[in-house]
Image (spheres, helix red, strand yellow):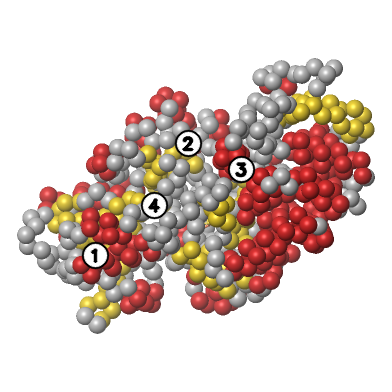
Amino acid sequence: MKTKQKKIKVGLVQIGDKFGDQYYLPYSIGVLQAYAQKNLKNPEDYEFLIPVYKRIFVKEAANYLSDADVVFFSSYVWNFQINLKIAKWLKEKDNECMIIFGGPQVPESRSGMKTFLNKYPFIDIGSYGEGEMPFLLILENIKKRSWENIPSIGFMKGKDFIYNKISERIKNLDEVPSPYLEGIFDSLIKANLDEGWSALLETNRGCPYSCSYCFWGTKTKNRINQYTLTRVFKEIDWFSKHKIQFVFCCDANFGILKRDIDIAKKVAENKKQYRYPEAFSVQNTKNSTEKIFTLQKILNDNKLQKGVNLALQSLNADTLKSINRSNISPETYKKLQHMFNQHKIATFSDMIIGLPNESFSTFADGVFSVIESGQHNRIQFINLVLLENTQMNEPTYQKKYGLHTVDSKIIPHHTSLNSKSVIHEIQKLVIATDKMPKNDWIKTRIFCWIVSLIYFNKLLQIPIMLINRMNSINFRELIEIFMQESKKHKVMSEILSFFNQKAKEIQKGGSEHVASQEWLNIWWPADEYIFIKLCYEDLLDKFYNEAKSIMCDFLPDKLLDETVRFNQGLLKLPFIKNDLDISLKYNIFEIYQGVLNGMDTKLKKGVFHYTIDRTSTKWTSWEEWFKEVVWYGTKKGAYLYSCYPLNNNKRQKRCDEEFHYASFQ
Ligand code: SF4
């Protein structure tokens, strides 16, 4: 023990990534500090260092923490590797410094903890479950170094492995003080005046569902414990007062409690009164149509949320059973989708590739069904990752469903190309299952990129909708024909082989996205990368000609030609100086609008004049367009211009909402 120090110095590490120009205030470690400061017998004996909250050089972090007597690391999959490096460095420099790891990345099982401590001998204590009590008791006992009576921890005592029972979760959450209201982050903010901050709002803990891929899905976490509304409201006031732009509500199921509507209203009122928070993002509960809609309408009307995620993950009954997920019901989904579409509230949906019992066929049918239910903005296709402390991470589960994994670097899309000094975080990615062998996983991955490229990035959404509407062929068959027929065409076959190559790379542990130094120096999702390539390298005309020959069996020539021409004209591009007047011989636009609004409009011949508004918003450089259209527009698939009917060849007044006929924003 260091005798020269009067106070016990406590190092805190919760490293997060930068989102936009902001970091999250390190909430988890802040809660622990607030709890300890309230409950320590002699809090004046301790000095809490300002937390390490962002990725810095390992050496820099270790030097900063080198005076600490004990360092606590909050670990999740996105910061575990850098935490390990800092911890190892600290231990090598000073064997007396106690290293404690907690958070979802620390195994909760006895065997998992034993392996963990053997693998990382520089970690003195692993803490599992809720961290408040172990954090407090470790600090109380730091001088004696006696851990036997501290619940929820594992450690080595000489050669013996000690695994203490996990404590019950805290039922009365108001025993846990708010780090915001207790001023825990004041010194952090003061020391980093140039930094922008986002914040997490926790109004309850726990989730009644048991999805096997999710940390919250274990039985011990299924009771929902709540903070009082008074405290939640005070925290929202704190966000407003501190000009926090973005607040993420980390509740597993926002909307599950009736009072969540009051919370949404409070955030909206604060935004009106104080301007902050500007944005409030939540994870919706399931199967509660009215409540979700009411909540999201409040958030949308007050411009607090950009898009609503109606997460599905899979639509296959066998898959949902094997992952213990009681999904949002298809009826609820369809009803919600329809309500949101009618109120012009943008939604997007998540689907996971590689879940147990999901084949290429069931997955593709699921995608078709989601689109049929009214999702025309975006399906986010996510590769399945196995997380620590989930049912899916157990070897018996993986064996049962034949899950094959590869270790790959975590590189979120649209992040900067890494510099050499950055430590890479690692994820366990599923690349094949019994029902989706390796080749089928590749086929599924390519299917998803093609769907994203031609449907959700809007390159061919209008002809595909029309073909589907006219019942010539269904959506899934059409995409499969695209995948097949593309091999015969130059541009399309290059796209196909690019996707094929990328999928194979991922299976070998390569990055999930595509690096481009030239295009903003960031990692692009593969479909967006190809979308940019087609536009930037002037390949659109060739692409559309090839697409027409692939689709020529499904629509009469003139109708197909007109539909493709119309779709191409609507595509947002940089350097455009004029609006585009367009005359059609079919009511294609009305049909398209009908599908978007859940109506069945019949095809008819006539003369239809439109103006495509290509000048209200313009992009005068590729960089501007990459960022504002391709990147920022991705969730809503906002890649098409607005279009107005032209009566008597007279342009309708653009700002008149009544005539703002179609906004694809
Ligand atoms: S995925 Fe959502 S609903 Fe399922 S266990 Fe996790 S938090 Fe609960």
- Sequence-wise first label, 3 or 4: 4
Q: Is residue 107 above or below residue 313?
A: below
The residues bearing labels 4 and 2 have C-alpha atoms spaced at a distance of: 19 Å
Q: Amino acid at mark 2?
A: Ala
Kindly identify which residue carries mark 3.
Answer: 630
Residue 350 is tagged as: none
Q: Residue shown at 71%/53% (left/top)? A: 451
Determine the secondary structure under disc 3.
helix
Q: Is residue 442 above or below residue 634?
A: below
In the image, residue 198 lies at what x, y percent? 40, 41
Determine the secondary structure under disc 2.
strand
Q: Nearer the viewer, residue 664 or 535?
A: 535
Q: Residue shown at 56%/60% (left/top)? A: 512
The residues bearing labels 4 and 1 have C-alpha atoms spaced at a distance of: 20 Å
Kindly identify which residue carries mark 1.
Answer: 90
Q: Nearer the viewer, residue 395 or 163?
A: 395
> Tags 4 and 2 in contact by the CB under 8 Å rule?
no
The residues bearing labels 1 and 2 have C-alpha atoms spaced at a distance of: 38 Å
- Sequence-wise first label, 4 or 1: 4
Residue 279 is tagged as: 2
Q: Amino acid at mark 4?
A: Gly
Residue 475 as seen in the image, left or right of residue 392? right
Quadrant of the image containing the N terminus: bottom left
Residue 16 is tagged as: 4
The residues bearing labels 3 and 4 have C-alpha atoms spaced at a distance of: 25 Å
- Sequence-wise first label, 1 or 2: 1
Q: Residues within 10 Å of mark 4 (few under 14, many from 20)?
A: some
